[in-house]
Image (cartoon, grey):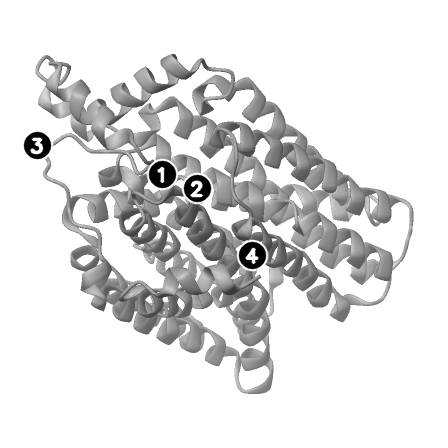
């Protein structure tokens, strides 16, 4: 099964930027649990820890697309290096405020100030999109690999952070996460030969999908660009309707992640087995990781938008399994099986969604566009966690699984409502015309 992935790493520099990016992404998955443990231990309040973490998450969700836009304009290395070095300042301030007993508002200020977070996963996908711009099958394989690596980080990061915080010192998890994040990001951008070139701001961007470059150039040559004011080239990628549909769908998907995590912890706690919650959540990530690797080896067929719609529908159906297990009192063992199965529906959906972004947007917009999509996921995680927390306090065990099931259904409705913007149900000729317009507009 892994043989096709060796083909990806045969390209010069591919393994180096993948491993460096993996270190940086591992730190992101460690930070959340490390922060909660640190503040709960030093300040004695899970409520404070949760709200500080939420404030930082919202700040990053706002800052990440802005960083993505700068990356598209100036290049990955020129933006990432100052951004990660800047983030060390509010991070150090947070640790000092915690240890010196500073007022709670300083914790919010420091954590929210660290919002200049480069999207390493998006930058890695942008590199693959550039390297594989004429090889759609391998691009699908690379996106599957990146999603599997994301899931691997979500499996290992929280466990590593928890072990360091509880066995060494509460601050060690945060310090280790900062070291991995800074070192991984700097090593990532040091791989200059695989960095996508910064597009000429006066030139027409081309989409990553195969065959769209020629269409975009023809549209520009036909005179469409001549009547367009220069300032419109810098408009937000959200003006591309398909990205708006994908971002709204990803926001609902983020609600699934946030609600599933909190509900599973609350459910295990209600049964008197709270330590098992970490293993149950790892099963969700394991199911998604395995599905992502297998999905990458399958040859994609049909329009990407139609595949995305099928993926969202499958995800919505599979998330009925934890709901049935939770409400039916099936026990932790069967719940674990249901969570693993539910996890297998998320990776194919995310892989196809990221591939669709690469097809809908020009290369010079990819970092910002993928950062917008990830920000939607992060906001959804916050909303899902908050909603599931309220349900857990006022309803019985398992009732919170209505939230991820409902969020998946909402994601399906959004995708169905916007399916024409994703190329579903559009005639082939109209699809090609729209791709030329998107490529010319940038």
Q: Work out which quarter of the rendered image holds the C terminus and state it.
A: top left
Q: Are the residues at dot 4 and dot 2 in contact (C-beta closer than 8 Å)?
A: no
Comparing 82 with 190, the one in front is 190
Against 425, is 248 above or below? below
Against 405, is 30 above or below? below
Pointer 1 residue: 358
Residue at left offset 22%, top offset 23%: 441
Q: Work out which quarter of the rendered image holds the N terminus and state it.
A: bottom right
Query: Residues under labels 2 and 3: Cα distance?
Result: 26 Å
Dot 4: within a 10 Å radius of its alpha carbon, few (fewer than 14), some, or many (20 or more) residues?
many
Reading the chain from its start, which is encountered first: label 2 or label 3? 3
Dot 2: within a 10 Å radius of its alpha carbon, few (fewer than 14), some, or many (20 or more) residues?
many
Quarter of the figure with residue 266: bottom right
Comparing 419 with 116, the one in front is 419
Residue at left offset 52%, top offset 51%: 296
Query: Residues under labels 4 and 3: Cα distance?
Result: 39 Å
Pointer 2 residue: 354
Residue at left offset 51%, top offset 40%: 300
Q: Are the residues at dot 2 and dot 1 in contact (C-beta closer than 8 Å)?
A: yes
Query: In this rendering, would 31 be left or right of 410?
Result: left
Say what secondary structure mark 2 lies in: helix
Dot 3: within a 10 Å radius of its alpha carbon, few (fewer than 14), some, or many (20 or more) residues?
few
Residue at left offset 75%, top offset 38%: 402
Pointer 4 residue: 293
């Amino acid at each position: 099964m892994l043989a096709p992935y060796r083909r990806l790493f045969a390209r010069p520099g591919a393994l180096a930027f993948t491993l460096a990016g993996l270190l940086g992404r591992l730190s992101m998955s460690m930070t959340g649990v490390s922060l909660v443990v640190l503040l709960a231990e030093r300040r004695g309040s899970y409520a404070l820890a949760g709200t500080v973490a939420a404030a930082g998450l919202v700040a990053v969700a706002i800052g990440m697309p802005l960083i993505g836009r700068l990356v598209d304009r100036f290049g990955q290395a020129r933006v990432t290096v100052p951004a990660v070095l800047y983030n060390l300042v509010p991070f150090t301030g947070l640790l000092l405020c915690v240890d010196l007993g500073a007022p709670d508002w300083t914790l919010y200020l420091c954590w929210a100030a660290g919002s200049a977070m480069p999207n390493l996963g998006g930058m890695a996908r942008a590199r693959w999109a550039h390297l594989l711009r004429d090889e759609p099958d391998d691009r699908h394989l690379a996106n599957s690999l990146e999603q599997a690596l994301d899931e691997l980080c979500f499996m290992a990061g929280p466990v590593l952070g928890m072990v360091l915080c509880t066995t060494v010192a509460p601050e060690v998890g945060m310090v280790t996460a900062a070291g991995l994040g800074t070192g991984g990001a700097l090593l990532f951008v040091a791989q200059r030969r695989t960095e996508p070139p910064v597009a000429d701001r006066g030139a027409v961007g081309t989409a990553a999908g195969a065959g769209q470059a020629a269409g975009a150039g023809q549209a520009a040559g036909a005179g469409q660009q001549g009547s367009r004011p220069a300032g419109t080239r810098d408009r937000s990628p959200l003006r591309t309707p398909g990205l708006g549909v994908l971002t709204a769908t990803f926001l609902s998907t983020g609600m699934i992640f946030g609600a599933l995590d909190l509900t599973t912890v609350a459910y295990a706690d209600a049964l008197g087995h709270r330590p098992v919650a970490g293993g149950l959540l790892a099963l969700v990530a394991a199911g998604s990781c395995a599905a992502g690797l297998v999905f990458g080896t399958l040859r994609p067929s049909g329009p990407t938008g139609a595949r995305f719609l099928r993926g969202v529908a499958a995800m919505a159906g599979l998330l009925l399994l934890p709901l049935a297990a939770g409400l039916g009192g099936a026990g932790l063992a069967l719940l674990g099986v249901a969570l693993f199965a539910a996890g297998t529906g998320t990776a194919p959906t995310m892989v196809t969604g990221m591939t669709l972004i690469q097809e809908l947007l020009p290369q010079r917009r990819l970092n910002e566009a993928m950062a917008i999509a990830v920000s939607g996921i992060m906001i959804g995680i916050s909303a899902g966690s908050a909603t599931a927390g309220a349900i857990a306090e006022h309803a019985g065990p398992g009732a919170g699984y209505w939230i991820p099931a409902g969020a998946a259904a909402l994601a399906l409705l959004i995708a169905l409502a916007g399916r024409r913007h994703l190329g579903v149900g559009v005639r082939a000729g109209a699809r090609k015309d729209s791709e030329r317009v998107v490529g010319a507009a940038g």
